[in-house]
Amino acid sequence: MLIMKIIGFSLCVLGVVLMWLQIRAISGEEITEGKVIDLIPVQGSKGGTNYKVKAEFSDTAKVRHEYLSSWSASPAPYAVGETVRIAFDRGNPERNRLFTFGARFGPGWILLGIGLVLIWITFGFGYGNEYLLRRYPDTY
């Protein structure tokens, strides 16, 4: 049980650190709205069609830039013409990415959740054993 607590605690710490690093990264970026201009079809790993998102946005000087996702999904996560939020580097708007909770905080949130579940399980089993000993003492 101690190993599960250590693993759970480590996952919680790692999750919090990842989210904290994202919060620091966000403070150095501009966030703006963009518009999906195309869904580029690519072949998925299982032979189906996936789609990469291509969006257009303007920086603070009103210069237009494009975002192209490095990932693909099926079905397409957005529709052409849909508004998306994009974060970009103030000094280099070509360094950009979608600004969504899942993309920014998803991995950290998942690690934190798994860690908390592991810790909860160890305390539950520990308490459960004590409860059974008190509730159902030896009868002979």
Image (spheres, rainbow, N blue to C red):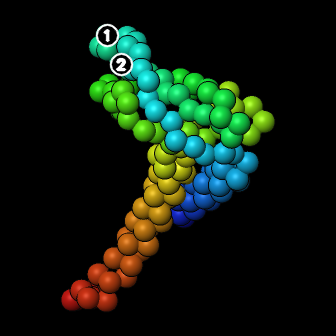
- Residue farthest along the front direction in this orientation: 62
Q: Amino acid at mark 1?
A: Gly
Q: How many marks?
A: 2
Q: Which residue is mark 1?
A: 47
Query: How would you rate the neighbour count of disc 1 (Cα within 10 Å): few for under 14, some for 14-19, many for 20 or more?
Result: few
139 w.r.t. 112: above or below: below
Distance from Cα at disc 1 to Cα at disc 2: 9 Å
In-front residue for pair 96/81: 81
Q: Amino acid at mark 2?
A: Asn
Left or right: where 128 falls relative to 98: left
In-front residue for pair 129/111: 111
Q: Secondary structure at mark 1?
A: loop
Left or right: where 104 falls relative to 46: right
123 w.r.t. 108: above or below: below
Foreground label between 1 and 2:
2
Q: Quadrant of residue 91?
A: top right
Q: Which residue is mark 2?
A: 50
Q: Which residue shows up at 38% across the image and 30% down it?
A: 81
Query: Residue 16's spot in the image, x, y percent?
Result: 61, 58
Q: Which residue shows up at 45% across the image and 55% down it?
A: 114
Left or right: where 33 falls relative to 13: left
Q: Which residue shows up at 73% across the image and 48% down it?
A: 28
Q: Which residue shows up at 61% across the image and 27% down it?
A: 64
Query: Residue 57's spot in the image, x, y percent?
Result: 56, 32
- Residue farthest along the left direction in this orientation: 139
Q: Quadrant of residue 50?
A: top left
Q: Secondary structure at mark 2?
A: strand
